[in-house]
Image (spheres, rainbow, N blue to C red):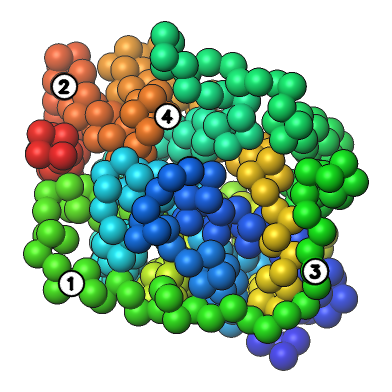
Amino acid sequence: MKKYFQFEELGTTYRREIIGGITTFLAMAYILAVNPMTLTLADVPDLPDNMRMDYGAVFVATALSAAIGSLIMGLIARYPIGLAPGLGLNAFFAYTVILVNGMPWTHALAAVFISSAFFLILTLTGLREKLINAIPFELKIAVGAGIGLFITFIGFQSAGIIVKNEATLVGLGDLGNPNTLLAIFGIIVTVILMTRGIKTGIFFGMVITMIVGWIFGLINTPEQVVDTVPSVAPTFGALFSAFGDPSFYTTAMLGVVLTFLFVDFFDNAGTLMAVANQAGFVKDNKLPRAGKALFADATASMSGSIFGTSTVTSFVESSAGVAAGARSGFAAIVTAACFVLSLFFFPLLEVVTSAVTAPALIIVGILMVSSLGQIDWNRFEIAVPSFFTMITMPLSYSIATGIAVGFIFYPITMIVKGKAKEVHPVMYFFFLVFLLYLIFH
């Protein structure tokens, strides 16, 4: 075991790997509550039942897909990186595909499955790297930042801090509302923890907020802590019904599949490079066993869609485990084991309300926009598509629309600037695809 995971070469021990794996799990654990809340649109009232996924089934799908992804990452790629359904992609799944576009959640799961299968093919053939290299660095940064703003906007809404306003579209909510006050308290606590450099600050911020909410009677006390695992039957394999529905085969669905594929491309690559660089794995700007790491993501996403959840991706919170000493894939296996054990603690999710999850969404949004400084805003031909990509996501309530607008404007500004030859042919292809997407959307 030690030889396979190269404990001696990496200067690590079982103790460090176990502590690192548990730390990564604690830093990621909020997704067990946030993902079911998001995919079931729990904070959206008066929705028909057929538009909501089963809460318990999504919880199980979340835990199982995270366990499978982390296990494959640990065993095959041998990196201390945990995987789970990603924030941003789950928001796109729920708030854009289902809520705004009105598509059945089975169609959304089918789109995740197709994009993951295509992702796997691209990874195995080596085409993935070529497609990534064709897209300008600034647009990659803008997509991540835009998703961060979108997630933050959703967090503010679910907390009641930002509400609908007939005169100005949006406005400040009732800050005297007890649940809104609880969410604000959670934001402040999480900010303090994160500012102090506590890597598990998001998780413990949620825990403290839950305790305070329970003390003041805003959150019900769970009747039990451990219970039987909920059934995954309501969502398991449900995606395959979409393939027999003619309404699935539309231009809009093509845009959905491309968005899942595109965002997963860069979300994964960025996270892998960031965590691997922190752990000292990156050599000459290259990541060893990158193909195996991407294979873990693709297979986890495919299995996750079959169980009933949105796209699975590498979590940047894995950096918490690396900071705690994790250096090998054994830590990811420990993280996977923790997700399996979490299946039996489903009753605890009763105390996780939107006031508890909102701070996590808002803080993750802050982390996602931190790379905006890498965009050269002095180059107007770059600033325009980058800004439109970023700002259109929260304003249109759609990640896909933000990507489409940015990818349409990029060739236009570059051609006008006299730099048409600098635009990769793939970007002209994306221009046509997303133009058709917006026209027939």
Mark earlier in primary sequence (2, 1): 1
Q: What's the amino acid at mark 1?
A: Phe
Q: Distance between the residues labelled 1 and 4?
A: 30 Å
Q: How far apart are marks 1 and 3 (CA)?
A: 41 Å
Q: Which of marks 4 and 3 is in front?
A: 3
Residue 58 in percent (x, y) is at 51, 67
* Residue tagged 1: 243
* Label 4 residue SS: helix
* Residue tagged 3: 223
Determine the residue positioned at 56% across, 54% down. 37
Residue 24 in percent (x, y) is at 72, 62
Mark earlier in primary sequence (2, 4): 4
* Residue tagged 2: 412
* Residue tagged 4: 394
Q: Which of marks 3 and 2 is in front?
A: 3
Mark earlier in primary sequence (4, 3): 3
Mark earlier in primary sequence (3, 2): 3
* Label 2 residue SS: helix
Q: Which of marks 2 and 4 is in front?
A: 4
Q: What's the amino acid at mark 4?
A: Pro
Q: Dot 1, crowdedness within 10 Å: few (<14), some or many (≥20)? A: few
Kindly identify which numbered label has been placed on residue 274. none
Q: Distance between the residues labelled 4 and 3?
A: 38 Å
Q: Which of marks 2 and 1 is in front?
A: 1
- The quadrant of the image that shows the N terminus is bottom right
Residue 246 in percent (x, y) is at 9, 64
